[in-house]
Every structure is written in C-alpha cells, then in structure tokens.
Image: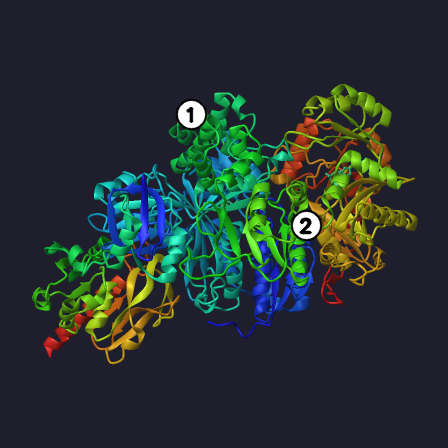
Amino acid sequence: MCARLILENGAVFEGRSFGADGESFGEVVFTTGMTGYQEILTDPSYCGQIVTMTYPLIGNYGVHPDHQESKGPQVRGFVVREFAELPSHWKNQENIDSYLKAAGIVGLADIDTRKLTKIIRQSGTLGGVITTLDTPTADYVHRLQSGAHRIERPVYEVTATDTEHHPGDRLRVIAIDYGMKRGILRSLHGRGLDVTVVPADTTAEDILERKPHGVFLSNGPGDPEEYGELVGHIKRLIGQVPLFGICLGHQLIAKACGARTERLPFGHRGSNHPVKDLLTGHCVITSQNHGYVVQDDSLVGTGLEVTHINLNDGSIEGLQHTEHPCFSVQYHPEARPGPTDSDELFDRFMKMMKAFGEEERDALAI
Amino acid sequence: MPLRSDLRKVLVIGSGPIAIGQSAEFDYAGTQACQALQEEGLEVVLVNSNPATIMTDNAVADRVYLEPLTPETVARILRAERPDGLLATFGGQTGLNIAVELDRMGVLEEVGVEVLGTSLEAIMKAEDRELFRSLMHRIGEPVPESLSVASFEQAQAFAQEIGLPIIVRPAYTLGGTGGGIAEDMASLQRIVEQGVQASPIGQVLVERSIAGFKEVEYEVIRDSGNNRIVICNMENFDPVGVHTGDSIVVAPSQTLSDGDYQLLRTSSLNIVEAIGIEGGCNVQFALDPHSDQYYLIEVNPRVSRSSALASKATGYPIAKIAAKIAIGYALDEIRNPVTGKTSAFFEPALDYVVTKIPRWPFDKFADADRRLSTQMKATGEVMAIERTFEASLLKAIRSLEIGLDSLDLPGTDELEEREIERRLGQADDERLFLLGEALRREWSTERLHDLSGIDLWFLNKLERIVRTVQGIEQEGLGANRVLQAKRMNVPDTAIARAAGLIERDVREFRKGVGVRPVYKMVDTCAAEFDAATPYYYSTYEEEEEGSPTSDRPKCLILGSGPIRIGQGIEFDYCTVQAIEAIKQAGYEAIIINNNPETVSTDFNTSDRLYFEPLHLEDVLHVIEREQPEGVIVQFGGQTAINLAAPLAELGVRIIGTQVDDIDRAEDRERFDRLLADLGIPRPLGKTFYQKEQALKVAEELGYPVVVRPSYVLGGRAMEVVSNERELLRYMAKAAQINEDHPVLVDRYISGIEVEVDAISDGHNVLVPGIMEHVERAGVHSGDSIAVYPPQRLSEEQKRTIVDYTTRIAQALQVQGIVNIQYVLDDEQVYVIEVNPRSSRTVPWLSKITRVPILGIATRALLGQSLLEQDLPTGLWPEPTDRVDVKVPVFSFLKLIGVDSTLGPEMKSTGEVIGRGRTLDEALYNGLLAAGFPFVQRGRNTLLTLLSSEVREEEEGVLEQVSELGLALQEGDSLSTDEIVQQIRSGGVQFLLTVHNRQKEKSTRLMAIREAAIQRGVPVFTSFDTFRAYGAARRIFLRGVELPITCMMAATSVRQPTSVG
Ligand SMILES: Nc1ncnc2c1ncn2[C@@H]1O[C@H](COP(=O)(O)OP(=O)(O)O)[C@@H](O)[C@H]1O
Ligand SMILES: Nc1ncnc2c1ncn2[C@@H]1O[C@H](COP(=O)(O)OP(=O)(O)O)[C@@H](O)[C@H]1O
Ligand SMILES: [Mg+2]
Ligand SMILES: [Mg+2]
C-alpha cells in the first residue's frame, strides 16, 4: 500500500506504507544513528516527532524487549528507505512492520530519505504528516501551516503517573521523569543505587522530604521554555541536594539558574556527536537527541560554567555549577542507542553524592 | 598536543612489491602519509623498492630511495639521512618487520631516530601472539584458547586437550601464509609443520576454531591523548573461517544490533588503549551468531587493507590522519578534511551500503586450488556503493570484470545437487553464484544457511534479487518490474537476458519509462552537514546531487578496476599521473574506478570521482550526466581499452588513439595486414577454426609454435609447444574451437625479447627507452627481468626497433602512448604485439629515464604536439653509467596447485626495481629486493633437475656454480620423496628445474617445486634467470658496498659497511 509524507512547506514524498494505517502529524526530524532503531522508536524524547532514519536499511535485526527504552514506540511516525521484512538475529522476535502495526504507528518506506534529510537540514525542522488516506495534499499543508503537528508540553504525555521505587543498597536517588529512558534507570540502578522515579511535576518539597542523596533530572521531549513550573521546582533543589541532569534535565537546570535556551535549526540526533571535556581536554563520541540548546551568552551571572562543548558546532554540551553540587550534560551517557564512552558520568554523580553527604556530616558535627 | 617542533625530517618505509596479502592499499596509505607530512613542512625521505607506486614520485616525497627493503639497506639510509623520525606503520607487515629488526640490531638507537606514532613496544604487544594474549587476559577481552608451539608434538597435546577442529596460525606472516584449519590429526600435523616453516621465528599459534561465527572488523584511530574513534565497522558476508581478505565484506555491519555494535566498539577502544596505539589500528572480532559471546581474532597495529577500504567506504582519510597523529597532533586539533570546518575527531555516519568483493586469480590459474580458507588468495578487490545491499552487491559483481553481471554463473544449472551442497559448505570463489543457482532451484534460505553459515539476512537479500530477475523472465519488461530491478541495480544486460532481449532494447525501454539513476555524494555525515566532497555513486532514487557544471572543459578518464595478475598497480600509477596532466592542461579531470585500494580513488586525486563499475551502462550514465569533451581510455589498462569500441559506437568521443586504430592493433588479421603494408616482420602465424587443422598448421610453420585460443573458458592457456604430441595434448584440453573461436598459432622465435613504450602525437614519435628482457622470449614480458638500457643489442638493432616503433605508431595514428613487444633472433627483429595503451613498464621507465612519459602522452593526446612540447623524436638518450632492472615478484606461496614454471602466461603479482652502475650490480639489488637470498655462511646447496638436452646446452654455467659458493647436487636420480624430504629439512637452498619446452605437467616436478616454495627456497625455471642470479651473486661475494642512490638528489650516498 502507498503512503505519503507531506511537509508543511508543501513537499511530498510518496512511498510504501508499513506499520499502521491512517494519518499522523508530527515534527519531522532525522537521526544519523546506523543502529538502534528500536531504542530510538521508544525514546520518549521523540514524543510528537516523525523520525527519519538516515541509514537506509532499518529493521535488520528485528525487535526485542531488551531494546525497549520505554513501554513502547513514542514517535508519531517513522520514515525509512527500506525496512527489513525478514530480519535476522538470535534475539529477533518480530519484524518492525508488525511491531509498529501493533503499536499503531504509521511508517513510510522506499522514499529518498537523503533528499528528505537535506530538506530538513536546509529549512530546519518542519511539520509533517504521514498518511495512507486520500486526503488532498493541499488540505494537509493547510492543517500543518496552522500547526496541526504541534503538541504542547509533551512531557506530560510521557512522564510517570505514579512514583516507582527500585530498591537498591546504596545511595538514594530521586529521578524526575520527564520522559526518562530505561537506559538511564539501568545506569543508575545498575550501580546499586536506590532509585525512586517520580512524576515530572513533583515539587521540590516532596522530593526533599524523601531525603535523597541526589536528584537526577531526566531527558524528555519538548521546548524547555514551556516548562516554567518544572524550572521552579528545580530552583528550590539547587544547593539543597546534588543534582545531575541529562538532555531536557540539563536544559531545565540551566534555566533554573537563569540561563536561556534556544532552538537548534535541525537538532542533534545520532550516535556520533563529538564532545570535548574542557576540564580534561579529553574527547568522546556521544549519543544525542535534542532540538534545543542552552544559549552560550546567557550564562553570565548564572553560576554555571561550561564543561563540555560540541566539536561540530561549538554548542554547550555540559555545565556545572561553580558553587553547588550540580552538573548536567546535553547528551546521553546511558547510550542505548550509541556509544557508552561517557558512562563514567554516572560515577561522577555518585562521587558527588558521597562527597556532599560527607560535607553535610561535617557541617552537622560542627 | 600540536605539531612536534623537534621534527625536521622523517623517513617513511613503503611496503615493497605487490603480493597477495599486501597490495596497492599501501601505496594509497603511504602516499597519504607522505603528503600529510609535507603539508606540515617536514622533509620526507621515502624508501620503497616498488617503482610502480605513486608514493615514489617526486611530488610526494622529497627524497626517494628505490632500494631493497632489507633492514641492512634501510640502516644505511638511516645512517646517511639521519632523520629525526621513522614512520613504519604505513608499509604493511614489511614496514613493521623492518622497524622491529632495526631496533633489534640497535640501529635505531645508534642513529638516534625515533619511531613515530605507535611505538615498537606497542607493536610487539599486538604482533607477538603471547604478549597479545596475556594483555587481552589482563584487560578481560576474550581470545579463543590457544597455545604457541614450535612443533607438531606440542600441537597434538593441545588438540587432545581442547579437541578439534583447531586453527593454526603462524607468527609474523602475511595473509595467513602457512596457516589453516585442521579437522583431524593428520591435517594438524601437515599444517603445523608448514606453518612453522612459514614463520620467520618458527612459531605457530594453535587455537580453538571459531569458524562459523560472524566476522566483524573495526577500524580505530587513537591519538597520544587517548582520544579514540571508530571510523567504520565492517561485517563479513562469509563467516569466520574465510580470511577477511577473501571474504565479501559490507560496511557498516548489517546484522548487529546496537548492543552488539557497541559491545564490540567499546572492546576495540579498550584494546587500542591497552596496546597504546597512536595512529590507525584494525581490530577483528568473531561474534557468536547465537549469543553475546565474542572473541578477538587479531589486531593489526597499523594501517591495512581494511583501513583503505574503510577510508573509501566512509570518505575519512585514515592514513592521513594517522600520520598527523604520529607527528604530534591530537585528533581534535586536526581539521576534518571533508567538511573543512569541524575537527577530525568524529565518527562517520553512512547513509548507504558498501560492498567489497575480492578479485581472485583463478581465471588465470585454472589449476589452482580455489577453495577459500584462512590463507588469503585474492590479488585485489572491488568496492561498490549503493543505498541497499542488493544494489551494492550487484554493482560490485560487475565491477569484478569476470564476465558476470548478476548472480548467474553459466554452467551452474548443470551441476548436481550434491556438488552444489558441497561447494556451499566449503567456500570457493564461486560460492556467491552457487547461492544464486540454489535459490533459482528454490532451495530455502534456511537450507543455504545451514550449509554455508552465511547469515539469513544476506541470503534473504540474494533471494530477492533472484526472484526479481525471475519476475522479468516470466512476465517480461514492465515499467514497474524494471523500476524494481533497477532499484536493486540489476544491470540492463541481466534484465535483457532475463527478458530475452538485447541491452539496447532494455536501455530504450527504461528511458522511455523514465527510469534513470541519480548521483549521490559520499560525505561522511549522512547529509547532516553541508559537505562538498567530489565523491559520487549512483542510485535509483529521486534527488540528484552536486552540480556537474564547470567553466573548464571536462575529460573523463577510465580507471583500471581491481588488481589482478596482468593488470596491477602500474595502471593506477598511469591513471593518477594522467589525471594530474589533464588538470594541468586546464581541464576538469573526472574519473570512474572501483578499486578501493588505490590512489586514483582518493577523492582528492581527481576533480570528481565516480565510484562505479567500469561496465558500459554505468560509464554511459556518468557520461550522460557529465557531458565531457571525451573519454580517455589509454591509461586504465585493458579494462579501459575494452570499453573504447562500445562507447564510440554509441557516439562517445574517444580522446587519443581512435577506436579503428586500436582495433587495427588488436584484431589479428588487420594487424597482420598493417605489418605487411609496412614491411615489418612478425613471427609467421596462422589461424585455424577446427581442431583437425591444428597439426597441419603447426607442420607448415615448424615447431616449436606458440598456440593460443582466441577464446577460452577459465584460463587463457597460451603455450609454447614443441612437437606433435604436445600439440595434441594441448588441443585435447583446449576449449571449444570453431568459426567464432579460432586458435592462433605462431612460429616460436627463440631470441631476445625487447619492449618499448613510445609516445606520439599522431606524427612524431618519441621512444623514451628500449627495455631488454633477461629471459628469452617465451617467458611473458611481465614475468621477465627487464633491463634498461639494453645490454645485448647492437646499434643497428636499436635503430631498427626505433624505426619500426615510429612507423607503427605513425601508421596507427597513435595519439598518446603505445607499447610494443619485439623478439630478436640473429637475423631479424619481429613484432610480437602492439598494445595501443600505456603499459606495465611505464612507471618504471619514467622513473629511471626521468622522462615524464605520462605527462607528455597526456598532453599529446589532448592535442599538444611533441614539437609544441619542445621534445625530440626518436630514442631518448641512454645513460652509459647506469643500469636499471625490473624484477618480477610472485605469490606462489599463496596459490597451491599453480605451476610456478615461467611461460608465456603471466604469473607474477608485483615487481621491484634494482639499480646499479653495471647490469650485475643492478641485478644484485633487484634480486635482493625481490627476496632472493644472498648468504654466504651455512649451507648453500643448489639442487638441479634438468632435462639432458638442457644440461648439455648449459654445461658451462653448471661448471661455474662452485665459484658462486654453491654446492651443486643433481637430483635426477633421487626419488620425489627423497627430494621433498631434503627440501623440508632445510637441505636445499636453491632449486633449478629447467625442462626446455617440455610442458607436460609432471607431478614429480610440481610436487618438488611446491615443497621448495613452501620452504621459501627460490625456484629457477629458466636458465636465464639463474644466470642473472649468478651474476648478482658474484657482486655479493665481492663483499663491496654498493652505493645507495637517492632518486631526487643528484649525488649518491655511500656508507662503509660490508654487504651480506
Ligand atoms: N580461531 C579461529 N577459528 C576459525 N577461524 C579463524 C580463527 N582465527 C582466525 N580465523 C580466520 O582466519 C582468518 C585469518 O586470520 P588472521 O588472524 O586475521 O590472520 P591474518 O594476519 O592473515 O589476517 C580470519 O580472517 C578468520 O576468518
Ligand atoms: N612468436 C613468439 N615467439 C616467441 N615468444 C613469443 C611469441 N609470441 C609470444 N611470445 C611470448 O609470449 C609472451 C606473451 O605474448 P603476448 O603476445 O605479448 O601476450 P600478452 O597479451 O599476454 O602480453 C611474450 O611476452 C613472449 O615472451
Ligand atoms: Mg586478519
Ligand atoms: Mg605482451
């Protein structure tokens, strides 16, 4: 069956439908990761987006619960050059077509994804719709131009509704779930930490009441500008408890300190983003997925300093607070998909929590 | 860490002659390294014995030593040059081994030269199997259980403990020389013994076999600040058990999940850190197809064939960056050479699929054992880029130039089921096509997987290709069916065959329905950033990239495809030089080629690179897009020349010698007429069309005769036959003979063979040099030792040769270059053949005469006459104080079953240069560089096996053997077993087996020669070669140091150490 992708600028791509039938609106983005399609599909930060894979052959090794980064696909649509009808891997349980069908996600295959990628690169992220219906293109363009693909505050679509406790024998961490990937939970819990995942809008007071050793702020979808109340909670956490933020968590920390964020023209999405640690001079390859970034010139007076930069465009990749135990990165040290080169950031968080604990004890002793 | 300020001068070691396992990739790597150093203002001194390389050109290095790559010679160069640094990781295993040896000899310390990049200590950690294993244990990286042994007994004990099968891998050898997988104790014994002999330190590793796992490679770069990146990973289509050099390989990996990919990526980063790599490194893994278990296969602590492939597959110039790291830079300080803006610290993202297929020499060597195993047999490879695996694979298949354009191999439909089953289980070069045949027979992919171990993902893709073509077979052309087939890049020729049409019909139908390819760019970043690489591939999609418009006129030059016997790196040298000249002449140079190993496919070489098959359809598509002034076919060997006529027929302009004139040189009858008109003799020859005519024709000409069928299936079978019996035997095994496939018979002229390369503008002719062969005619020109200037020709003969050459070039209206081969007997000069193109000898000849042959020829074919170029005509003055030789190098060690006897079919894979003040000195240097042993101490037994006729003829030579310090032993009365035993136990140092014109393949001689080759004993099958060795040995025995000459400096350097 045929399907179309229609962009708000009027461009149309016709190809083959896979996954579910119907129509679905979203912001069209691309990712350059060559592996990890299932992790991408299930990353809640992609909520509201139609994701294009620049690597042409997708679905080769099938689908398996181990690759799930959340309970199921979070994207609004999926675009590939070719999907594998017959995947092959010892872990393979089903092909991506049936997987997306079951999840009700529309997919489009057999199109010139490189052409689409270049359009996005040149004109910036665009609204789009994938459809298997006969609705005229002009109608869709009209709806897109009036913002049919936009969703407000998507964090609230993906955050946990209840707290969830993952007992551990070491330090207690509260993880604020703005759309947290399972990989992060694994990285924290895997270190023996006692992790309690709480909904995004949990107040600072509720959090501090639980006497955590540290608070983790997760990744998540959407524009940080839209989350004033979440920033408010964070403001009251800084200095009270060690904080570590990733991606949206990083941006919200920056805002809580008074910095500004801005939209990147087409985002950073992939498994190959080079990042330099300004403190050590060491460089790592990172996994990324973000459309917004902390503004370079907005840091004055925030108490934040830049610890990491992106070697491609010089943008901010990591921050730390000069006075308080608080640091954050724009990229994904938990990988999944992508390289695990930055795994040690979780150790840094642990060290920070331990040191803070000792300081407090010292303070009490005095 | 920026550029080190303490470096002024750096010595780079090249890799020497092309042999199986060590090919043109090191010219590419070495050239990039030299350029990277020059860019930084460093003085580059280069040593390489291979004259056919770009790296040995003036433009690439400041000072070039075309000297033997022995530790002794390199030591002398080090002492003379006193460089600050040594780069040894760009010359393959040869470069590494020399550096290790120089260090052991204490030379590095003595001269105060520092090994740049990866340290020798680190190299040892990767190369020494024991050190490597213990390091891997320490960092927790899994290696299969193994043991280093020096004898079968030790191996046996190990095998009893862990069980068979066992893989045997010799220490310090290339391409798996001397290794293999043993299924039982008998084969274990054989392989261990052979491996111990092949290893320079007499050691092999016996190891648990992990055949059947997925084989995956990672190309890693690390700098001294421990910044590490993976440039590319690659997955083998053939599971572990087939050498990666003999495997079909795809990039990036296709069947690895992100977890698998990262598991191995992290492991490779840990490994390069633990070893201490500073530069490029290749890490090979085996991954269990049924679990997360993986093993390390090996680590190559240097640039390699795989890094060349990875560079071409991604656009990331690994060797260049590795060289920058070696001189001090950190990865993030080096500019990304592709975007020109960001840093070199990044990992390429691909948005296409790359497929590499090896090119094997079995078309030349019909008798070779074509089974593939852990020992590499391929001479070269092709690479293709497309958006799907099917398309990429099909492009690669037709790039091979093996007469195939799809998964169909003629004749496989007649094979029995059992035969196909067997050959799917034991890989050989045709397995891919047998898979195609099995799929046509509707065998299930599961069955194919069980037989071959190849991942189902690949097999499913093959099945899609087969079904798509079958769809056309059943239902004929149709817009949608053709579009689907073209999306898989099925060529028009294969579609036509399926539809029962001819190629032109399909082309027209396709155009009628608007199905045509577009070109996309290789940009390292999957279009994420705006990059402007002039590097393209075709695909059947929507968007066309990169505007081909230009304000300069354009020339399209066709490359020479994969390296194979008879068409080697020389033609890439010619292509690259021609590109340079085309650019200088104000044109835009556009190239089509598909060989990932070469300099010509570096996207910086030409103005635009199309990485495409050299197949008519693909070439036409590029022409349609680019609309060049014309196409140059003279520099890409026979590959390019063969495309001239079909292109011209379709109205494409050929720049240079015209197609009709090319045809007059290549078509036997027209050529005969041309020579008759010119009054130039050629050996008397006849053509016959029926087997029955053979004897009569030979009788008329008189024995011995040279026979060659104009068409043969598998093997070009040209032979010299000396009597009726031999001719009958030849006819019996010859392929079909009929009106369309005649046999050519020539009188055999026993005499001196000579060849010339000449340049003409259509009127005037310049002959840069006449080259004389050491071996008499009958040994292929590519397998003979060539000498310049000629030593045995009279002035009169030279005049005749120049006169004939001039008149032939004029008659053929040659514009550009031509190569002519002659044979001289006492009375006459005969023409053997005319090649209307550049040749194997051109790089060597240009270097030694210093005539820029390719530049002149290119300008001439673009219309600038010799006069306008201020050049003389006739023979370029010959030197009187210098002699140069070109010595062929063979790879018989890798090719079991191939008869090493020299004859009219070419067998060598590479060549070296030897320079001297006299012929004997040049021979000494050349033979030394080619690997002939020159030692005085110990045993020096020469075992001879000669026919009585030969013995009589050459008595004089044999009598003088003792003067050469050799002990003569006649082997004719010994049994085959006795001789083989003696060879194996080290009792024979040289073997001389000459059986003049008696071409019956004696199993006795084959067995003896093979034993000698396995043991590294030089085998002389021509007395002429042996005499040359004798002359060289006399120089050696004199013990006087020969001067070492630097090509670029006018003076020669002399150092007082003794030879030998
Ligand atoms: N333990 C093993 N069991 C089975 N096959 C192996 C094993 N180790 C290596 N091989 C095969 O042998 C080939 C050559 O081995 P390798 O160590 O890479 O030697 P080389 O130095 O010639 O590249 C590999 O490409 C792989 O296919
Ligand atoms: N008539 C002949 N007499 C003696 N040797 C010959 C004759 N013809 C060919 N040869 C030998 O065979 C070799 C190959 O023949 P040639 O015609 O040059 O074929 P190719 O196209 O393979 O170079 C020559 O280099 C020469 O040594
Ligand atoms: Mg190997
Ligand atoms: Mg010839």
Looking at the image, residue A336 sits to the left or right of residue B417; the answer is left
The front one of B522 and B264 is B522
> Quarter-wise, where is residue B273 in the image?
bottom left
The residue type indicated by label 2 comes to Phe
Q: Which mark is residue A186?
A: none
For the residues labelled 2 and 1, the Cα–Cα distance comes to 44 Å
The front one of B308 and B130 is B308
The residue type indicated by label 1 comes to Glu
Q: Is residue B242 visible?
A: yes
Q: What residue would you read off at disc 1?
A: B442
Total marks shown come to 2
Name the spot of residue A330 as percent of width and height, x first: 28, 65
Q: Which mark is residue B635?
A: 2
Q: Is residue B207 visible?
A: no
Q: Which residue lies furthest to the top in this view?
A: B692
Give above or below for B327 relative to A68. Answer: below
Residues at discs 2 and 1 in contact (Cβ within 8 Å): no
Name the spot of residue B128 as percent of width and height, x first: 50, 51
Give above or below for B970 relative to A353. Answer: above
How would you rate the neighbour count of disc 1 (Cα within 10 Å): few for under 14, some for 14-19, many for 20 or more?
A: few
